[in-house]
Amino acid sequence: MKTAIFPGSFDPFTLGHESIVRKALPLFDRIIIAIGANTKKNSTFELEKRTQWIKATFNDNSAIEVLPFKGLTVDFCQAQNAQFILRGLRNPNDYQYESAIAQMNQALNEEITSVFLICDPAFAAISSSIVREIYLNGGDVAQFLPKAMKLDA
């Protein structure tokens, strides 16, 4: 079974994230959206709420699971019998950043392969940090989020 881990803090999960997961579905038998604790970030939305939103977004697909995790992504991959780490790229800066992480993950566990998918152009400007800033300053972010996500619910 080909299993991919799609790791991130997903604070919040955006249309870009959703697009990458849906684009990856034909490539893998199972995709685990792994909500990790980023030691450099303070979360705006509680882990439980992020988990609920993402599960609601994909409640139509049994090949997608949503799980929280702590620690190294490669360790989580091993624990879940996942052979792949799925990452989305919006621009060349994302590639540089993600490439360095992929190389480190490869050094930590050579049996895990990083797979990069290019974001749809319609979502290239959407980032969780920008959406978070808009939200925290009272702006309407609904157009950047999956329909299943209701921030005020």
Image: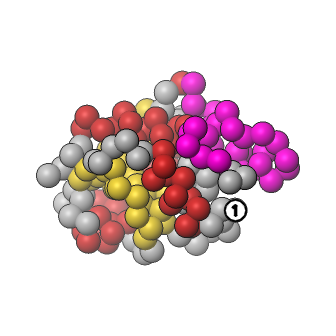
Taking the image as shown, residue 39 lies to the left or right of residue 74, namely right
| Residue range highlighted in magenta | 122-150
Quadrant in which residue 82 is drawn: bottom left
Q: Residue furthest front?
A: 153
In the figure, 147 relative to 10: above or below?
above
User: Can residue 20 be seen by looking at this rendering?
Assistant: yes
Lateral position of residue 124 relative to residue 35, left or right: right
Residue drawn at the location 44% of the way across and 67% of the way down: 68
Q: Position of residue 92 (x, y in %)?
A: 52, 36
* Membership of 137 in magenta stretch: yes
Q: Residue furthest bottom?
A: 71
Membership of 132 in magenta stretch:
yes
Pick the front one: 14 or 146: 146
Q: How is the image coloured?
A: secondary structure
Q: Position of residue 33 (x, y in %)?
A: 40, 55
Crowding at dot 1, Cα within 10 Å, few <14 / some 14-19 / many 20+, comes out as some
**Amino acid beneath label 1:** Thr
**Front residue (pair 2, 60):** 60
Q: Position of residue 112 (x, y in %)?
A: 24, 58
Q: Which residue is mark 1?
A: 44
In-image side of 132 versus 139 (left or right): left
Instruction: Name the residue at the right extreme.
Output: 137
In screen coordinates, is 102 left or right of 127? left
Of residues 6 and 98, the one nearer the viewer is 6
